[in-house]
Each structure stands twice: as C-alpha cells, then as structure tokens.
Image (tube, rainbow, N blue to C red):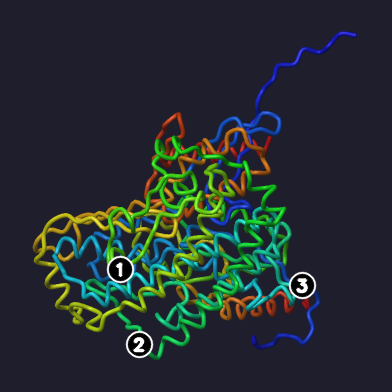
Amino acid sequence: MAKGLPKSFKKSLWAYHINSGSCNGCDIEIIAALCPRYDVERFGIKLVGSPRHADVLLTTGPVTRQMVDKVKRAYEQMPDPKAVICVGNCGNTGDVFYESYNLVGPIDNILPVDVYVIGCPPRPEAIINAVAKAWVKLETLEAK
Amino acid sequence: MKTKQTTKTTYHIPIGPIHPALKEPVAFEFEIDGERIVDVDVSLGHVHRTVEWTATKRNPIQILYLAERICGICSYCHPTAFALAVENIANIEVPERAEYLRVIQAELERICSHILWAGVAAHEIGFDSVLFLTWQIREKVLDLTEYLTGNRITKGIITIGGVRRDITKEHHPKIFETLNYLKDNFEKLRKVYLDDKTFRMRAQGCGILTKEDALKLCAVGPTARGSGVKKDVRVDQAYFSCADLDIECITPDVLTGEVNGDVYDRIIVRLLEVKQAIDLIEQCIDKMPAGDIVSEPKVAKVLATLKKASGEGIGRMEAPRGEVIHYVKLVEGEEYPFTWKVRAPTYNNIMPWVPMLIGEQIADIPIVAASTDPCMSCTNRVAIVDSGKKYELNKEELHRLSVEKTRRLMA
C-alpha cells in the first residue's frame, strides 16, 4: 500500500477516465480493476461519467493531436483539489509511438501529472496502487 | 383559437469524442426527429497514432511489437497477420506444431474478446451485474493467457516463423481446468443472454442489418454472420492448422432456425463462437504434433533473410471482430518495410452502423453501436469517412467541428 495512507478515508474517491488515443489495453485493465477479482468499488472508488464529479483523472494513451484540447477541457472541468494519474507507458513516454508525428504527449507536456503508472499495460494491482497514492495527495491537500 | 403553424424540423445531437457511453474517442452526429434517428454521421481519427508511418522506420521484428499495440484487445491477431504477410513474402515455412499453437492462442483471444464484449453489451443496457459476472469469468481466461504467454493483455508470443513459447504436458492440467470452468459457466451465460427478459426486450428487433446490407457494406465477422452471411476466413481460406480442424460458420439459424440480423442474433453468434473456440482449443491440443515451435530461433538470422527478401505479401486472419488484412511490401536490401497497410475489421463494420441506427431510438444508440464490437484504436489508420455524403476528414474539418461545438456551447 502507498506510504502515508491513513487508516480511514474522509471520502470515497471518484475517478474519471479519459482515453486520449490509447490502444484499449490500459482501459480494459482499469475496468478489470473495478470488476470482482480486484473490486475497488468496495473502497468507494468508482468511475464516474463526468469530469465535474471526479476527484481523480485517469488518462490513458499517448495524447494524439485531435485529443489535446479535449483532455485539457476535461481537466479544467474537474473541481479542486484534483489529482491526475497517467496509466500506461505510452502516456508516460510515448512508448512504441514515441516518434509519431501525430502525438503531442507525453502527457506531462499537457497536464500536471501526480502519479505515473508504468507497464504496457500495467496490471490492475499497479493501477489500484496508483489510485491509493493519489488518495494520499488529496488527503494531504485537504489537511492544509 | 388560431393554431400555431409549426414546421417540423429535426435537431442534431453530437455524441463524443468523450462520452461516458463510449470507451474510445469517436464522434457521432445524430439527426433526430422526436425520438427517432433520421441520419447518422461518424467522425473518426481521434486515435490516429501513425502506426503505419512509424513502421517504415522499424525492422519486421520490431514491428511485431508495434502491431501488438494497435489494439489491446486484438493484441494477438495484428502481429500474427503481419507475420503471415512477411512469411508469405520470404517463403518462411512455419513448423506444424507452431501452427497449432498459433490457433490455440487465437482462439483464447477470441474467448477473451467475446466475453469482454458480452460484458460491455450488458453494461450498455444498464445490466451491470452481468458485466461483473462476465468479467469474473474473463479473469480466468486471462489467468490462462498469462500462464501460457507471460502477459495478460499484450502477449508478445508471436515471432516471424513460429511462436515464442511452447505448450507442454505440464501446461495441460491448467488448460483443461480453465476450459472446464468455461464450459460450466457457459450455460449460465447462455441463460442470461438468450433467455433473460431484459436482454430479449432490448435486443430483439433492434438494430437490424439485413443480409443485403451486410453484403453491400462488406460487413465482416460476427456482424456479418449475425445477418446470415456465411463468411469466416477460417473456413473460406484456412490459415495455420484451421484446415485440419472441424470448423463451421456460425449463423444464428443454428440455434433459432431463423435469421433476423438484429442485436440478439449477433449475441447468439458471439456466444456460440465462445463454445466453438473452447472446442477448437481441445481439438488442437489433441491433434498437435511434436516438433519445433519456430523455424529459425535466431532473430538476427531471420532479419538477414528478410533483408534479402523482396515482394508483396498479404496476411488474412479471422480476428474476434472479423477479418483482418495486413499488406506488407519489402524491398531487397532494405531493413525496413517499404509499406505496411492494416485493414482492421471495425473499418468494415462501421458502415453498417448507418442502416442499423436509422429509425431507432436515441436510447438504443449504445447497444446498437456496441453490437458490432467496434474498436476505434484498430480503425484509426484511415481518415476517410463515407456515410452517404462522402467527405474526407482532415485536420481543418476537425478543427472546424471543434470550433463549431465550442461556439454552440458558448451560445
């Protein structure tokens, strides 16, 4: 578990998932994390349909040119305090697509990323760990 | 009292590219008359990652891993189709055992993909408990995939001239355990999807694609078979060891005796294909001969052979969503391919959306769109959209649409 995580949480964490041109690999692992085997919904973590309801932004994919403004807009619509998690290698570094002419990413050129999850795709355990780390950030922000 | 003269006008609903009902970026523009859909426009291109262009700077072995990342769900069929095309050019003979192993992996992927789709379809009609049920079953298949290949999603098992990992006797207990688990749960799934009232209400008579339309619009895979078109690459042009196996085209009349071409029929086809895939894996394990699993294990030697090869090759394969075609051209003396073209099944299956959606209600959009099992990340190498009006989608067009949408929001 992530360091500094309190034993009880002040609120449950809602995540918004945005696909910025990913290959679906990370997206299905995010859904897999919500499903019975890993079941993060028991901690109150769930995917929501609107960025306006979300505490955490989960981004996947290397951010194609067509998706930049949409990613930015989704981020701006989220209420503060917020955290951004980048899931998967291609959002972190570009991965196999690094030299592509249609990429604006890696994502930290566009958004301030709090947690990087590596792996292509990362296992659901890694995604859950990342969400817990984002939780620590949000809890510390709230304590201030 | 004077009656007010009203002119009946339609209105537009834009959906996407980011929308909770869509797992992938794709934009629709619906023309709505009351609750009925009059016209549909689909814009693609949001997942364009220039895979084919990047490939002209990589050698064929590197491209295998690039092809794998075209789509995370079809992460087996793309590199395999590419390997088929390259083997076709360089006349590389694949050992017989490797051909059987390739079929086993392909069928495992089909089970995974169809169960995943079943869950998504249930989610689209608001039946979330079934989503969880199916994904729980899917985890078992992923466990087996991980056990056999080392990874859950991107498998990295294909290499040019064979496969990278063998299936030995030690693997058999776990394989049979998973297959038996699937068989036990198949009956449960069949009951939920085919007998349940909720599914029948939403799926029967909804999103109809007639056989004529399916043929005219070149639908492939379960979408075409759901409309009664007997089209399956495994049967029509058997690749690997498919010719030795007992495979039949599955159309919905096998079960119900009639073909309607609606969402329900596509569910039937996919469900029966899961059963067929389990059977095929068993057949493969039974018939698999002993021998090598790769024609040339040294990668450097394979690359040297490919550098000398010249010509064009085509790899055709039945992916879970339909037929996938890869075209490759190699030039002698060049390490990198001259060109590589991918035609993913969703490209064909997007056009049938138009006849399926017209006349349906707005609330039916998610389930109808999902019924073809669309995969945008496979498709977005192509930026020309044809939906009756035919126009080319370029950056300006997208920008214009984006500006328009912003203006609409501001107004």
What amino acid is labelled 2 in the image?
Answer: Thr
At a point 45% along the width and 83% down the height, the residue shown is B147
Same subunit, tags 2 and 3: no
Classify mark 1: helix, strand or loop: helix
Tag on residue A98? none
> Can you tell which of label 2 and label 3 is closer to the viewer?
2
Same subunit, tags 3 and 1: no
**Alpha carbons under labels 2 and 1: distance apart:** 24 Å
| Residue B311, percent from left and from top | 13, 56
Chain ID of residue with mark 1: B
**Residue denoted by label 1:** B64
Chain ID of residue with mark 3: A
| Residue B256, percent from left and from top | 56, 50
What amino acid is labelled 3 in the image?
Answer: Ser
> Can you tell which of label 2 and label 1 is closer to the viewer?
2
| Residue A45, percent from left and from top | 71, 72
At a point 65% along the width and 71% down the height, the residue shown is A34
**Residue denoted by label 3:** A12
Classify mark 3: helix, strand or loop: loop
Q: Nearer the viewer, residue B166 or B82?
A: B166
